[in-house]
Image: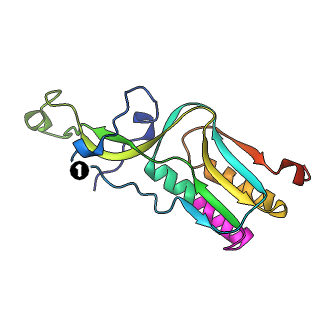
Amino acid sequence: MASLRPNRCYRDVDKPPYTRKEYVKGVPQPKVVHFIMGNLSAEFPVKVNLVATRPIQIRHNALEAARVAANKYLTKMCGRMGYKFQIRVYPHQILREHKMATGAGADRISDGMRLAFGKPIGTAARVKEGQAILTVWVNPDKFPAAKEALRRAAMKLPVPCRIVIEQGKELLKL
C-alpha cells in the first residue's frame, strides 16, 4: 500500500466543503473507532476541553492517534470508570488525491493534468478557531491526569491547542 501524503497537503481550510458522500464513490471509512469512551452514565463535575487555536482540517488518522493516546493515559491514571472522554468533531470532509506515476517511463503512462480531479483517499474534520476537539469529564482529584491526557493528545494533532477548563474550575486547587 502506498504511503500517506504529508498532512501539509490537506491541513489548510482553503477549498469549499466536499462532504456529500452520496455523490462520491469509494470514500474510505474514518479510522476513528469510538467517539465516546469511559464511564458514560456517571456525572463528573470537571469538564476540560482541548481547543484549536486556528482553523484547520484534521485527518481521521490523526484524530484516532490522539484518541488512543489520551484514552490509554486516562485509563491508566483514572481507571476504566473514572472518566468520560469524547471526540467532539467528526471527519466529514472528503480528501482527494491525484495520483502521479513516478520513476522511469512514467511520462508515457501518466496523463499529467488531464482528469486531475482526484480519487477519495480519506476524510478530515474541519475545525474552526476556538472549537473544542476533545473533551474530558473527570472528578477534581483526577484533573492533572485529564490535563496530561489532553496534552498528549495535542501532540498528535496538526494544530497548536489550548487546554480550557469549561466547568468545575471552582472545585480545583490551581
Instruction: Give the magenta part as a residue range.
Output: 68-82
Report x, y in % for residue 55: 54, 31
With 141 as the anchor, is 164 left or right in this view? left
Residue at x 52%, y 46% (from the top left corner): 89
With 114 as the anchor, is 82 left or right in this view? right
Q: Amino acid at mark 1?
A: Gly
Q: Is residue 42 magenta?
A: no
With 67 as the anchor, is 102 left or right in this view? left
Q: Is residue 99 above or below residue 156?
A: above
Residue at x 27%, y 44% (from the top left corner): 120
Disc 1 target residue? 26
Residue at x 28%, y 39% (from the top left corner): 97
Taking depth in this image into account, of 100 and 24 the one nearest to the observer is 24
User: Magenta part mainly helix, strand or loop?
Assistant: helix
Q: Is residue 149 visible?
A: no
Q: Is residue 12 above or below residue 64?
A: above
Residue at x 42%, y 25% (from the top left corner): 14
